[in-house]
Image: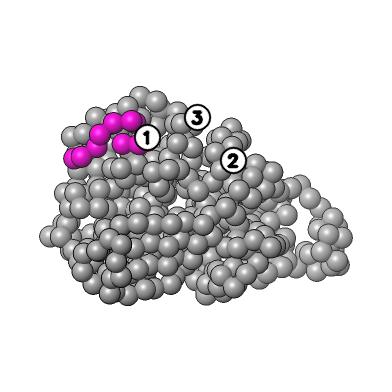
Amino acid sequence: MTKREEEILKIIKENPLISQQELADKFGLTRSGVAAHIFNLTKKGYIAGKGYIINEPNFVTVIGGVNIDILGLTDTTLIQQNSNPGHITFSLGGAGYNIAHNLTKLAVPNYFITVYGDDLNGQKFEEDAQKNHLAIQDSKKIPDKSTSSYLYVNDPDGTLNVGVDDMGIYDDITPDFLSERLATINTSAYCIIDTNLPEKTIDWLFDNCKVPIFVKTVSLNKSYKLQNVLSKIDTLMTTDKELAMLTNSSVTDAKTAEKSAKKLLKKGIEHIYVLMPHTGLFYIDNRNTKLIAGIPIKRVNNNGASAALTAAVVDSRLNNLGWEKTTQIAYTAALICMESAKSVNPLLSKDYLLKTVTRYLES
């Protein structure tokens, strides 16, 4: 799709009954020029029939954060209040970005909605999006603000010791900002969000979004934002620590995870995935429960594992896979992520994921 076609498709999503002459006036084109673009969009399968019916039944929207990840990985167990030898890496990350990037690597069409700064890191994000074919036309560059950043230090086994985030720019993901993109959101199959969004924005989105919403929690101090919308969440991806925070309980193993997750099921959540990096993955809905015990791998970085899991769950749901197969695929995606220093493993693809499921869980 060309840039002009993307622009025209965006307007059509917002107003499916717009005329070709109105489109021509809007873009400074001739009516015949717009007709040519419409023909190309129809030929490529993006629209169909009168009224410009959007023909993307399997695309999803992702609303969340993008940031620069600065990872310090120590060679040995961290010594507090002391210099520690190790390695430092810089890469793009953020829960929303990681989910969108993983979805793209799994060949799931998606639109990523975020905000970023008019700075060097924002430029890196734009270049990365072009390189990795991320659809960010609904994202917004904010002048005079810095792109979000996340600094964290891990032990050699991937365990997080400490993290500091500078994410004030996400306050610009407001209800007004999303209302301008609501047509895209409501024509997607699913909407996936992370808890970097402001609480008032999350509340607004659940009142106005007409498609199932998947939520990925991102940290202990942001999970509180979900308290008003728990009854409306279709699928929740979280960790044992974040589950404990959401339910004000202790989660130390599969048994306590099940007890706590049942509290959320009673509030209305339909599907819950609890990633416990060293214990495994626990899944529960109102009829089924499953624990996949931890697989021994060489863990490098747990950051991004829940995002990979989220992308795999979405892909599996789009392909109508059963809950048990979905859980296997999702946990394998998380393991693949943990094996890389980057928050999105460059090796990930649908073929690689399915082969790794066989190697780890079906052998």
Residue topped by disc 2:
201
Label 1 – label 2 distance at C-alpha: 19 Å
- Image coordinates of residue 292 in percent, x first then y, are 19, 47
Q: Quick one: 338 or 52, which is closer to the camera?
A: 338
| For marks 2 and 3 on the same chain, the one whose residue lies earlier in the sequence | 2
Residue topped by disc 3:
228
Q: Quadrant of residue 118?
A: bottom right
Inspect this view and state whether residue 350 appears. no
Q: Is residue 20 left or right of residue 358?
A: right
Q: Are marks 1 and 2 in contact (CB under 8 Å)?
A: no
Magenta includes 301? no
Magenta includes 251? yes
Query: Image height check: is 319 above or below 153?
Result: above
Segment colored magenta: 244-253
* Quadrant holding the C terminus: bottom left
Q: Quick one: 52 or 224, which is closer to the camera?
A: 224
